[in-house]
Image (cartoon, rainbow, N blue to C red):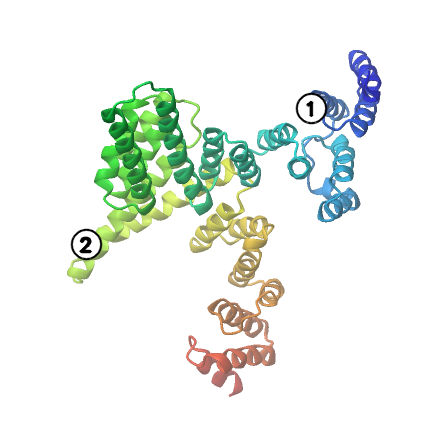
Amino acid sequence: MAASDNFFQKAELAVKKRNYEYAITLYQQGLAIDPDRLEERKNLRGCQVRFVQEKGGSTVGGGMFKIKNAKTIGVIAKLGKQKKFEEQIVEIEKLLTLAPQYAPALLAQAEAFVATNRPSSAETCFRWVVEVDPANTDAWKSLARLFQAQGDLEKAVECWERVKGVAPDDAEAGKAIRDLSAAVMMKRTEERKKASKEDSFRAMLKDEDESEQLQKQAQMIRTEDDALAAVSRKKAEIEADPGNSRLWREMGDLLAKIKKFDDAEKAYAKAAEVNPEDMYVAEKLGTLKEQRIQSAIEDAKIAVSNAPDDAAARAKLDVLLAEQNDFLLGELERRVAAHPTDFGLKSKFGDTLMKNERWDDAIAQFQLARKDPKFATSSTANIGRCFLAKGVSSLAIKELSTALGQINDRDSENWKGIAYDLASAHETKGNRDEACELFEEIMSVDINYRDVSARVDSLNS
């Protein structure tokens, strides 16, 4: 009997007696000796969840949880940087006792298992993350790479599709789906070759032709050339596998690119029909409607350009722009609710709310979006602009100053735009010297920027 078995057996008895706290301690002691016991780790997680729930606590953590346990979280991060993964795994388990479904800790533990070559444990942890946070693209990407490393390309594709469902514009996911899908099909061709007992010249030509067609298909989808031919090839795939909702969605994507919107909608509807659990269809339909409206707007703009005095054409364009605005407000609100950890969506929703002068709602979205470093500067600047529009100059100055301090390139449009708005906030506040100094700084790099020269002349006079 392994030394850890004694702890695990006692832990099982403690669970039967509903003594979860003692069971957790025993499981942790056993796993400290033998960390590769996957089933026991699953049992530990179940005990932790029940223990926290019985105490009336939150299993997923939260803002105050991060503050209260900042020291432990820091230690875990430090151990990861030092590549002391065994120690890190133990420390993470201590933190998970307090919040067993705290996604950042589960994700860190999964990555530690990857680093120590424990793919089964890593897969389990990644799946715990996405159960708690289905929109966690980092976890889906890591899980996809894990499957890819193991040679399970089909599962890898499924994970990358999850990423695309959360972040439709993710270039890495799009490329991975295209490349891996082609690789899967090539692999199937090779398997058929090996399994086949046909040795004739005709069979060889048939297989070679199929491989060539697959390569052409992958290239075609990758470059998006000759969309009609791509649609034809996709139809052939669907005929071979009509119950695959992913193929129907890809067909919808191709049809949408060539502006066959009605047919695209039918393809997405078929995806939902063959797989009611397909979580991407709603996103696809929303994107499709957005494309429809944008296409109509482009046509209306051409009509106005060709006949500037045509009041009916101008009125039609205005109606379409209003329809687009209303749609985006509703659709982005729905997407943000469906994907609470997608900070890019929050930033985009904030932009739309700003355009509608819903300043408080926009501020709330930007305050969430700036938790992601990619959106920190732009979101902070937009918060400042919203406060400026609300007439709260002091807060506008604070936020815009913070955003400006995060930009090193004074010649960039971003720096000039934030500096201009900060100067305007100072002027509104009555800080004429500060406003003039900022406008002059902009003039020193771009004297033709907006009306900055006139603003300086006005302040100096």
Badge 1: how crowded within 10 Å, few (<14), some, or many (20+)? some
Tell me the amino acid under the disc marked 2. Answer: Ala
Q: Residue at x 64, y 36 (%)?
A: 114
Task: Pick whichever of labels 1 and 2 is earlier in the sequence.
Answer: 1
State the SS at label 2: helix
Closest to the observer: 407 or 239?
A: 239
Residue topped by disc 2: 313
Residue 341 lies, with reference to residue 425, above or below; the image says above
Q: Is residue 387 above or below residue 187?
A: below
Position of residue 128 measured from the top left corner of the image (x, y, whole percent): 62, 29
Q: Residue at x 69, y 24 (%)?
A: 38
- Asked if marks 1 and 2 touch (Cβ < 8 Å), the reply is no
Tell which tag, 1 or 2, sits nearer the viewer: 1
> Please, is residue 208 above or below residue 308 in the view?
above
Q: Position of residue 46 (x, y in %)?
A: 70, 22
Q: Is residue 291 left or right of residue 165?
A: left
Q: Residue 38 has which mark?
A: 1
Q: Which mark is residue 66?
A: none
Residue 450: quarter of image: bottom left
What residue is at 28 percent from the left and 43 percent from the top?
Answer: 257
> Which kind of residue does numbered mark 1 sit on?
Leu
Residue 66 in percent (x, y) is at 72, 43
Q: Nearest the camera: 417 or 310?
A: 417
Q: From where the camera sits, is residue 250 visible?
A: yes
Q: Quadrant of residue 69?
A: top right
Mark 1–mark 2 distance (CA, rounded to whole Å): 66 Å
